[in-house]
Image (spheres, helix red, strand yellow):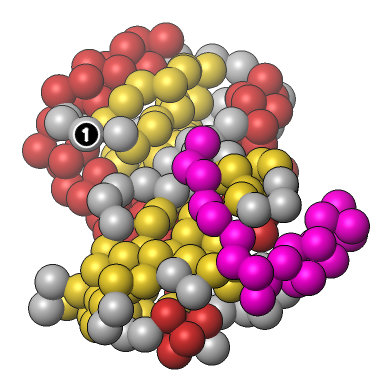
């Protein structure tokens, strides 16, 4: 769900946007604020995807609120004053809703905001270290932080992730290990590689992952595992 917050000194304006948000599938109304100053702390400390923000309010303007946000969501300005449109676009907002607006115009603004969210998520995803593998005839990026362990199945490997079903790809365990950060992953058996930060406990012949899965430790890898154990 895309989480929304409304900031407007008019309760009726918040009520209308709440109705529109509930009508639009995939949106969720988190909170509404008539006190713009109060909203700043909430937005900075919670995940907000879309902020519907009035411009002219007592104590602080919508532009003033935007400047104080350290955790910036995608913003849609809402106002009865056409004069502020240029200011809004210069601040990089997704859209500018001129009151009164109907549901169709609201939908158009939301679609623009969702496109901004998708672009932001793509940019963030590109920055996260990972590796590309071919699985089910598709090239898929796997973030290193999402890998729990890898299991060899002769010519194939099965990659277990924090979410979703395991991915199977045509590659040797040795080849895949070379693609992984050496400080974050360790081969512990001829058939297994584990993410070191996903280990819950270590014993002589096995280790237990945080998911509860038990992985055998081969004789060849005892010393490496002991070194890791001593460093914890």
The x and y percentages for residue 199 are 64, 49
Q: Residue at (61%, 50%) from the top-left corner? A: 206
Residues shaded magenta: 212-232
In the rendered view, tell whether residue 231 sits above or below residue 70: below
Q: Is residue 218 left or right of residue 116?
A: right
Helix, strand, or loop for circle 1?
loop
In the rendered view, tell whether residue 153 sits above or below residue 145: below
Q: Is residue 226 visible?
A: yes
Q: Residues within 10 Å of mark 1 (few under 14, many from 20)?
A: few
Q: Residue at (32%, 66%) from the top-left corner? A: 158
**Residue 12 or residue 50, whichever sits in front:** 50
The x and y percentages for residue 10 are 44, 15
**In what quadrant of the picture does the N terminus appear?**
top left
The x and y percentages for residue 225 are 74, 63
Residue 201 among those drawn in magenta: no
Q: Which residue is mark 1?
A: 26
């Amino acid at each position: 769900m895309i989480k929304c917050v409304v900031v407007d000194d008019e309760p009726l304006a918040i009520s209308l946007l709440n109705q529109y948000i509930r009508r639009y599938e995939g949106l969720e109304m988190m909170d509404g604020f008539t006190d713009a100053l109060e909203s700043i702390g909430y937005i900075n400390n919670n995940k907000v995807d879309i902020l519907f923000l009035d411009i002219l309010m007592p104590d602080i303007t919508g532009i003033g609120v935007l400047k104080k946000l350290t955790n910036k969501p995608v913003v849609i300005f809402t106002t009865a004053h056409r004069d502020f449109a240029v200011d809004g676009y210069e601040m990089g907002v997704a859209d500018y809703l001129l009151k009164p607006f109907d549901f169709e115009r609201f939908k158009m603004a939301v679609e623009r905001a969702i496109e901004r969210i998708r672009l932001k998520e793509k940019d963030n995803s590109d920055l996260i270290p990972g590796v590309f593998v071919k699985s089910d005839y598709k090239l898929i990026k796997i973030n290193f932080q999402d890998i729990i362990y890898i299991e060899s199945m002769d010519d194939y490997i099965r990659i277990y992730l924090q979410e979703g079903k395991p991915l199977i790809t045509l590659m040797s365990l040795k080849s895949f290990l070379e693609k992984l950060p050496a400080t974050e992953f360790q081969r512990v058996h001829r058939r297994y590689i584990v993410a070191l930060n996903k280990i819950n406990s270590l014993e002589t012949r096995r280790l237990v992952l945080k998911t509860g899965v038990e992985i055998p430790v081969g004789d060849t890898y005892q010393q490496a595992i002991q070194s890791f154990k001593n460093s914890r």
